[in-house]
Image (tube, coloured by chain):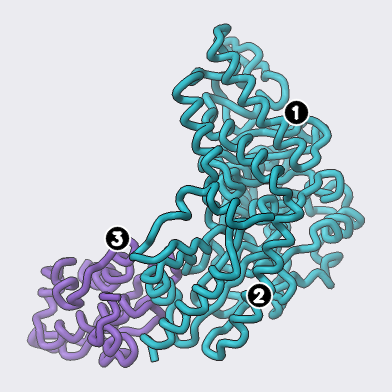
Chain colours: A purple, B cyan
Amino acid sequence: MNEYTSQILDYSQNPPNYGQIENCNYTVTATNPSCGDNLTVYLSVGNNGKITNAKFWGEGCAISKASASMTLELLIGKNFDEINNLKQKDILNLLQIKISPTRAKCAYLILNALDNISK
Amino acid sequence: MNIENIKSDFPILTQKINGRDLVYLDNSATSQKPQVVINSITNYYNTYNANVHRGIHTLSEKATEKYEETRKKVADFINAKSVKEIIFTGGTTESLNFLANSLSKNLKENDEIILTEMEHHSNIVPWQFIAKEKGLIIKYIEIKPDGTLNISNLEKLVNKKTKILSLTHISNVLGTINPVEKIIKRAKLVNPDIIAIVDVAQSVPHIKVNMQKLQADFITFSAHKVLGPTGVGVIWGKYKLLEKLHPFLGGGSMIASVTKKTTLFAEIPQRFEAGTPNIAGVIGFGVAIDYINSVGIDNIYKHEQELTDYALDKLTKLDYVEIYGPIKRAGIISFNVKAVHSHDVSAVLDNYGIAVRSGHHCADILHNKLNINSTVRASFYLYNTKDDIDQLVMGLSKVKKIFK
């Protein structure tokens, strides 16, 4: 039962960045067609190019919610351009769990959303 | 029906998953295969691998004979009038794409197709393809909140423009057994020219499907849900309609003669089976039907009904579990653990060796209608036991404990 660590459970059951941002600079939705999950990401970026606020909204499993929540937490205060540098291994570093191939789509849904923002 | 004997015929079921005895409850996705089916495939490749309907040599003749034996077994299994009414395809999805494509040749703009909101995507998307191409109109029979079809206004839905009615016999999510005979009869009273297709992929493994009763013009199903190999599907069609049906695929073995300008088709059913078929798969499917017959399809249904009643009784007692669908149903139960995503439920159960399906089970329209994102699905077959359901209930208590 190694994937449901207390960290994953905390972040998925009470995600600190769960919600919507009105008048944000960027909003984009990613979906996981294998389960119908969806994730909408909201980003506010300051004049200096730094991410000032980041939230997500939608339906997902514990892995996808924890992944989204922790990734956005990491991005707040960083330069907007740094989104482009995010890799799958960064997500794994945050989650600190082993991801099976079938759960990869859940864990990396946030990356798909962010990819669409930076395009 | 001795379940322990039956279980011992399925080598996969003896293994451990994550240190626990495998509890396989994902039978609506695919069934497991008995040793005799596996052996028949190996035996074909080891001893008489050859192409069918072609060579005048011993191996080809034996392969052809075995391949055609399965056609007879399928015809008998569903009580078809003739072996010529059985067409082999690659699976239910291919069968439905075949029918949508071939039947659409006789359709014109504004003709109507009736489906239901509980169809698998394989009975929606092919019709959407041809509807877009030909300007056809698709209408849906609605699902009621209890998970059954609302057929009270069927006569309003059907009209003279309705050309095709295509619906599932059993919902792959809710286990609802649709009154297809009644629906088809009533639709044909309004318009006798309607072609009725019944997707029996979820019913033929579990209940007696009788073509002399079902009222259908075509049915579709897959071997792999009936203890057979993957990659084999069936279309049964009324012979009179097959005579008018254009082949879906052109190529070898479906022709009588080919000139630079035109092709004369082979006889029915060969004209519908272009190219080298899945010979090993079809032969294995024949052995799977023998196995089902040796147990008895009515015994299988009775056993699954007992399991379903037992499971519904146990699951309704769990206040943290929400069950979807009608009380009277086939051996398919979809549910959610409150406030826990179906993927997480499935992942925790897997840790205890319990295999269930999670997600939307290729039925987006149904899930949207019921206003749920996804569900966990447990589905039973002849080798499942009450102990398997007890294990599922135990696993769900672990889910509850983790996501408290």
Q: Which residue is mark 1?
A: B84
- Quadrant in the picture for residue B347: bottom left
Q: Quadrant of the C terminus of chain B?
A: bottom left
Q: Which residue is mark 2?
A: B310
Vertical position of residue B185 compared to residue B266: above or below:
below
Check disc 1 and give the amino acid type.
Answer: Lys
Q: Helix or strand or loop: what does disc 3 sit on?
A: helix
- Is residue B112 visible in the rendered image? The answer is no
Vertical position of residue B153 compared to residue B291: above or below:
below
Number of dots carrying numbers: 3
| CA separation in Å, label 1 and label 2 | 41 Å
The residue positioned 52% from the left and 24% from the top of the image is B276
Circle 2 Cα neighbour tier, 10 Å, few/some/many (<14 / 14–19 / ≥20):
some
Image-based side of B13 in relation to A78, left or right: right
State the mark number for residue A101. Answer: 3
Q: In this orientation, which residue lies closer to the viewer: A109 or B178?
A: B178
Q: Helix or strand or loop: what does disc 2 sit on?
A: helix
Vertical position of residue A68 compared to residue B354: above or below:
below
- Quadrant in the picture for residue B156: bottom right
